[in-house]
Amino acid sequence: MRRTLALVRGTPGCLLLLFGNFAITFGTNLVLPYLAVYLSAERGTSAWAIAAAFTAKLWAQQGLMALGGSIGDRIGTVRTMCLGLLLRALSYVLVVTAVSDVGAVIACGLLGVGSALYIPAGKAALARLVDGQAEMTAVFALRSTANNAGTALGPLAGGLLLFLAAPEATLLVAAGLFLALLPPLWQLRHRIPHTVPQPAAVARGGMLSILRSHPRMRWIVLTAVTFGFCYVQIEYAMPITAAAEQGKSFVGVLYTVNAVAVVVLQLLLSARLGRLVNAAAVIAGGLGAMAVGFGVFGRGSAGFLVLGVVLFTVGEVVVDPRLDSEVARTVPVAQHATAFGLVGFGVAVGGTLANVGASSALGPARLGDRYWLLLLGTVAALAVTTRVCAPRVRRSAVTERSPTPVEAAAN
């Protein structure tokens, strides 16, 4: 870990990108946990409009992420990140000023678009600063740690702001935080190399060309679908089971356990995992840990629920950063942002499949602990399939990268 921190400190721009991720997730979670309540109680937004607004946000963020990544590859990662931040800030201002149900839907959809632009471009920018597979995996793990620290602290600060001031103040503080990040991030355009834009014909087929040209990328996207199927359980199925078994207040305990465990486990595991070269085995092991966590979670007692979430989190911290580093390793620099967007789209597809299953006759509300046993078997089978179907890495296919600023200065 000390080696990773030294790398971050010694790579100009890297620390700023990681802090930016923390600040953005912190600012987002100042508002997001309380947004539905604000729209309903303060703005009088109808129930259908709130549901439509959150659906618009989800699919604008995840469904448009591949398009957002393509834009990042065309106009530059830093420019795309700054545009995403502007749209995020504007969306919160629109939430405050919206006077209709349609306005609330547009505002939340705009928040999702801002995320779709920022996330793949931010990952691509980070990948361009760091060289080496182990180092990249460790830095992406730090990125996940920064995100989860913001996710853990944001709701606490948001609750305090709601206690001290009007709800509109929290929205405007978050918007101001996004705007404050713009000047320092904009300066990174001089440090992060921007590749020459591709011809229009290539850009139009960018996503398909990536999948055609890189067999490993197809495996990565399908693995992202599997990961999304697993990860979204903490948003829907896990809270339903926890509330039924231990009461609604216990759901908050599980979210806190997840956020804290992510930060601690990333710090403990990131450097060690980065040194393991067999990515397919590492990812399959992470999915296997999630599968065991689901099986334990189905036991229902408080201790088993917590243990299940911890095992789930082990899988999360193993798979998530490794997928990102595999994208950076597999795809040329000029297509990084598009490729990261494809992974985000895969996660959205997997999450949608999981939510459909959890809300159907096969869901936890109807099957009880049998749902978790079914999930254990399904995810274990997917983990084995992920390992067996992984294409071999050819040495000649290693990603062509631009030199980092440190390397350029040395040369």
Image (tube, grey):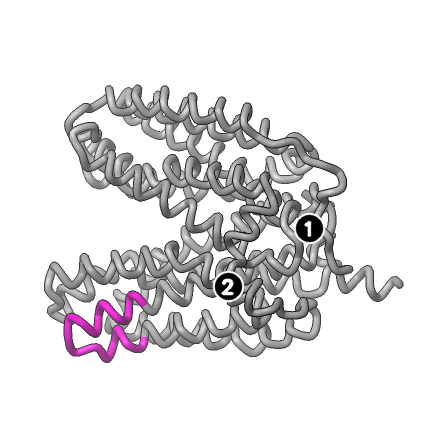
Q: Which mark is residue 193?
A: none
Q: Height in image: 114 above or below 267?
A: below
Is residue 106 a member of the stretch shown in magenta? Answer: yes
Which residue is the extreme one toward the right?
411
Give, as a three-letter code, the residue at label 1.
Leu
Q: Residue drawn 41% across and 51% down?
A: 152
Q: Is residue 281 left or right of residue 344?
A: right
Q: Secondary structure at mark 1?
A: helix
Residue receiving disc 1: 5
Residue receiving disc 2: 204
Is residue 398 a member of the stretch shown in magenta? Answer: no
Q: CA distance from mark 1 to mark 2?
A: 39 Å
- Callout 2 environment at 10 Å: few (<14), some (14 to 19), or many (20+)? few
Q: Is residue 174 left or right of residue 202?
A: left
Q: Is residue 303 visible?
A: no
Q: Height in image: 163 above or below 59?
A: below
